[in-house]
Amino acid sequence: MYEQTIFNVLTILAIVTSPLVAVSVQRKLDEGRAGRQRKLAIFRSLMTSRASGLSPTHVEALNSIDVEFDASHAEQKKVIHKWKEYLDHLNQPVPDSHSENDAKVWIEKKGELLAELLLEMGRCLGFSFDKVTIKRSSYYPRAFGEFEFEATALRKAALEIFAGKRPLSVRVTNGVDSATG
């Protein structure tokens, strides 16, 4: 009789708690999947924008690494370490333009560190890219580079004019096109 009562109590307890356990397990699985999806979104953004490091998408993805990758997991800790190395380099000023070789070395190291970060992130997420693929197989139209260069040159020139460091040439005409009239 006593054994039957214990069995009945345990049965009722199992019936009552099993849905709660199932919901808890499902929630943990969903959280894990959602975390992986966020990590994949960061990786995807960085891979698709790796040729244009100034794009807002690229910068936002880089700044999301600390939020989504967890240093308490060994593989994710490697990603964070590579991110910190890359960030440290990005926070060093680019050498002056009159030191062209130094600037070139800085840019090459930037590309190398980004490739290492993406390689480690890819490994962590189950991808098997090689460094050459990451560094060399992205498309960035030449016109985009020219546009960025021209926009930078225009901003610098405008700032120099506004700061009084560069004169602004003005030519006054009488409004008649000299070619026709």
Image (cartoon, rainbow, N blue to C red):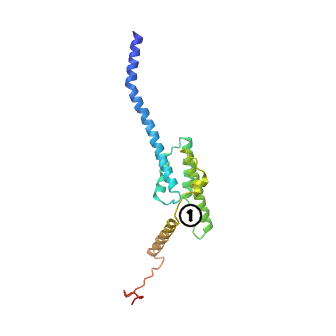
Comparing 128 with 168, the one in front is: 128
- Quarter of the image that includes the C terminus: bottom left
Picture coordinates of residue 33, whole percent (x, y): 46, 41
Residue 61, horizontal then vertical, whole percent: 48, 53
Above or below, comparing residue 152 to residue 32 in the picture: below
Residue lying at 37% horizontally and 20% vertically, measured from the top left: 12
Callout 1: 10 Å neighbours few (<14), some, many (20+)?
Answer: some
Q: Identify the residue position indicated by label 1 in the image.
A: 94
Residue at the image point whose x is 49% and y is 68% from the top: 147
Q: Which residue is found at the position 58% from the left and 58% from the top?
A: 136
Q: Amino acid at mark 1?
A: Val
| Quadrant holding the N terminus | top left
SS for callout 1: loop
Work out whether residue 72 or residue 31 is closer to the camera in this orientation and state it. Answer: 31
> Horizontal and vertical percent for residue 169?
45, 82
Q: Nearer the viewer, residue 138 or 161?
A: 138
Please tell me whether residue 167 is drawn above or below residue 8 in the rendered image.
below
Query: What residue sits 43% from the left and 38% below the top?
Result: 30
Instruction: Count how many numbered circles sit on residues in the image.
Output: 1
Is 82 positioned to the left or the right of 1 in the image? Answer: right
Name the quadrant containing residue 180. Answer: bottom left
* Horizontal and vertical percent position of residue 27: 42, 36
Q: Is residue 43 above or below residue 140?
A: above
Residue at the far bottom in the pictured view: 181
